[in-house]
Amino acid sequence: MVPAPPAAESVTAMRKILCVLLSAVLAVSALSGCAVQKNPDADDGKLHVVTTIFAPYDFARQVGGDDVSVTMLLRPGCEVHAYEPTPKDIIAIRNADVFIYVGGESDAWVQTVLEGVDNPDLRVVTLMDCVELLHEETVEGMQAERHGHDHDDEDEDEEELDEHVWKSPSNDARICQKLCDTFSAADSAHAAQYAQRCGDYVEQLDRLDAEFRDVVENAARKTVVFADRFPLRYFADAYGLDYYAAYPGCADAAEPSAATVAFLIDKVRADGIPVVFTIELSNGKLADTVCEATGAKKLEFATCHNVTAQAFANGATYLQLMERNVQALREALN
């Protein structure tokens, strides 16, 4: 279980305050004559790209190669739902040539920033605009608090779009093509290089997709259990997997309910599930509880929203993380 953010009511209030602060920062920048100040290294001949999280950060590196300079706003080792932009982050967005973000409620702050950015040349890519969207779903046994909601009567029956769109290789291929098109429009001198690298990378994504399909098609079962958040709706849908989990992908929950814990333990026992998953940057305590009660093995499944500081320093890539997921999924389904 990822260390929990504040309760939903507090998160909503905090985000309202954040929007006010962002507006103030942008207003001060404008009054100070700071519009469109490029980075000190802006004359290095590279396209300057800013992304919010790890997956599009790596996609931008793979498509852009040496022709781009990529900055990730989310600090390595930090959980994305606890992220709040700093004034330095806002300046980085304002000075970028391309800004890439996910969309959805976790990025509610972005619109306020973009409305205040005085950079007519800034190109913006929203990952949720690149793919066919799915709704978040609450499966049997899942504790269903959702990130940033007040849970009033008006919201109770509202279906929330799942923002974790980078969790399937086929979606990633579409996202990379959008990045290629955007980079080429911003930097036509290197369009051929962007197209070549994008094509090569999409081929690797296609091979990854085939690996996952092979694992699932030859598996003894088609069900996975996550004693954690489950930001993998697109992955499960792509490969026809059934799943049980403690929370949806954007849940706010301090502790799992006794009913949720009991359900997961009973499900693992009844179905003989050999592996219980947790996600990166999670404390794993719920998974430990389920595994101790059932004898199942705890494994990590990378969602690629972020990596540890050490992994980042070592040059971790999306494909490396997903190849580990291939092996973990094979063990979980057999």
Image (spheres, rainbow, N blue to C red):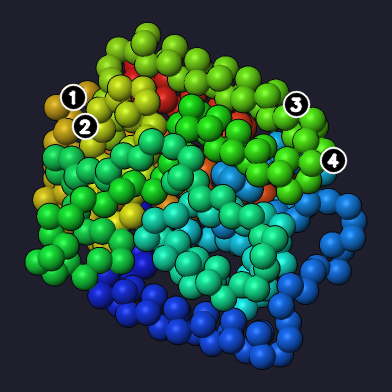
Residue 171 x/y as whole percent? 48, 32
Element under disc 3:
helix
**Which amino acid lies under the numbered mark 3 shown in the image of this protein?**
Gln
- Which residue position holds label 4? 189
46 displayed left or right of 320: right
* Dot 3 crowding, Cα within 10 Å, few <14, some 14–19, many 20+: few
Q: Quadrant of residue 122?
A: bottom right
Q: Nearer the viewer, mark 2 or mark 4?
A: 4
Q: Are marks 2 and 3 in contact (CB under 8 Å)?
A: no
Element under disc 2:
helix
Residue 197 x/y as whole percent? 74, 29
**Which amino acid lies under the numbered mark 2 shown in the image of this protein?**
Val
* Dot 1 crowding, Cα within 10 Å, few <14, some 14–19, many 20+: few
Residue at point 30% right, 66% down?
148
Residue 310 x/y as whole percent? 67, 51
**Which amino acid lies under the numbered mark 1 shown in the image of this protein?**
Asp
User: Which mark, by number, is residue 271?
Assistant: 1
Q: Give the quarter of the figure containing the C terminus.
A: top left
- Which residue position holds label 3? 196
* Dot 4 crowding, Cα within 10 Å, few <14, some 14–19, many 20+: few
Q: Quadrant of residue 297?
A: top left
Say if 38 sits above or below 22 in the image.
Answer: above
Mark 4 vs mark 1: which is more N-terminal? Answer: 4
Mark 2 vs mark 3: which is more N-terminal? Answer: 3
Residue 314 x/y as whole percent? 72, 45
Q: Are marks 2 and 1 in contact (CB under 8 Å)?
A: yes
